[in-house]
């Protein structure tokens, strides 16, 4: 007789065509959730991440997919900030010249390192401001990717502790 071990069910990665399609759809859903969460569209990727982790998905795969999606979503917000920067002379620009000068002084004082807070609830404003102030793209990508990945690592660790994964 064979003994059956009670193990947590884990998604099989590509064992058959149907399962492979479900894996792609599920990970694409996480990617989209993480992407949207980093844009001005209000969305919570953490719920999707933790839900998939609770369902038995591998934490490393979730961290990689969510981090890439969230970083690329921040690139959209950064791009919107750069576009806004070109609109400074328009009447509808959200900052007056005096406010813009204060923002530049503030940014000069605290610097690019604030992008390490891009994971926080107010992080989208920091990301957009970095676009307006034209932070170099490589610096932006490095700091935001570190911040976003760090957040998902901590979330994955907390989820593993909570779900016993």
Image (spheres, rainbow, N blue to C red):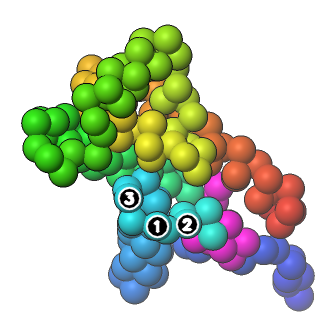
Q: Nearer the viewer, mark 2 or mark 1?
A: 1
> Please, is residue 60 above or below residue 9 in the view?
above
Residue appearing at x 32%, y 26% in the figure: 98
Whether residue 31 is visible, yes or no, is no
For the residues labelled 3 and 1, the Cα–Cα distance comes to 6 Å
Secondary structure of the residue carrying tag 3 is loop
Magenta-tinted stretch = 48-60
Nearer to the camera, 90 or 116 = 90
Residue 148 horizontal side relative to residue 163, left or right: left
Quadrant where the C terminus sits is bottom right
Quadrant where the N terminus sits is bottom right
Main SS, magenta residues = helix
For the residues labelled 2 and 1, the Cα–Cα distance comes to 7 Å
- Residues under numbered marks 3 and 1 in contact, where contact means CB atoms less than 8 Å apart: yes
Report crowding for label 3: few under 14, some 14 to 19, many 20 or more residues within 10 A (C-alpha).
some
Residue where numbered disc 3 is placed: 40
Residue 51 horizontal side relative to residue 122, left or right: right
Report crowding for label 1: few under 14, some 14 to 19, many 20 or more residues within 10 A (C-alpha).
few
Residue appearing at x 58%, y 51% in the figure: 121
Q: Does residue 59 show up magenta in the picture?
A: yes
Secondary structure of the residue carrying tag 2 is loop
> Please, is residue 7 above or below residue 45 in the view?
below
Residue where numbered disc 1 is placed: 42
Report crowding for label 2: few under 14, some 14 to 19, many 20 or more residues within 10 A (C-alpha).
some
Q: Position of residue 83 (x, y in %)?
A: 16, 42
Residue where numbered disc 2 is placed: 44
Q: Position of residue 44 (x, y in %)?
A: 55, 66
- Residues under numbered marks 2 and 3 in contact, where contact means CB atoms less than 8 Å apart: no
Nearer to the camera, 106 or 27 = 106
Secondary structure of the residue carrying tag 1 is loop
Q: Does residue 51 show up magenta in the picture?
A: yes
């Amino acid at each position: 007789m064979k003994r059956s071990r009670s193990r947590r069910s884990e998604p099989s990665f590509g064992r058959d065509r149907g399962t492979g399609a479900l894996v792609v759809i599920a990970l694409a859903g996480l990617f989209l959730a993480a992407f949207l969460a980093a844009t001005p569209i209000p969305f919570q990727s953490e719920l999707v991440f933790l839900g998939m982790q609770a369902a038995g998905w591998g934490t490393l795969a979730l961290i990689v997919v969510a981090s890439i999606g969230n970083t690329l979503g921040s690139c959209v917000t950064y791009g919107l900030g750069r576009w806004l920067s070109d609109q400074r002379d328009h009447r509808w620009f959200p900052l007056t010249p005096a406010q813009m000068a204060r923002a530049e002084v503030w940014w000069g004082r605290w610097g690019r390192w604030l992008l390490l807070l891009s994971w926080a609830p107010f992080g989208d404003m920091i990301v957009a401001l970095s676009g307006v102030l034209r932070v170099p793209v490589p610096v932006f990508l490095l700091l935001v990717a570190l911040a976003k990945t760090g957040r998902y690592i901590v979330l994955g660790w907390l989820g593993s502790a909570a779900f016993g994964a």
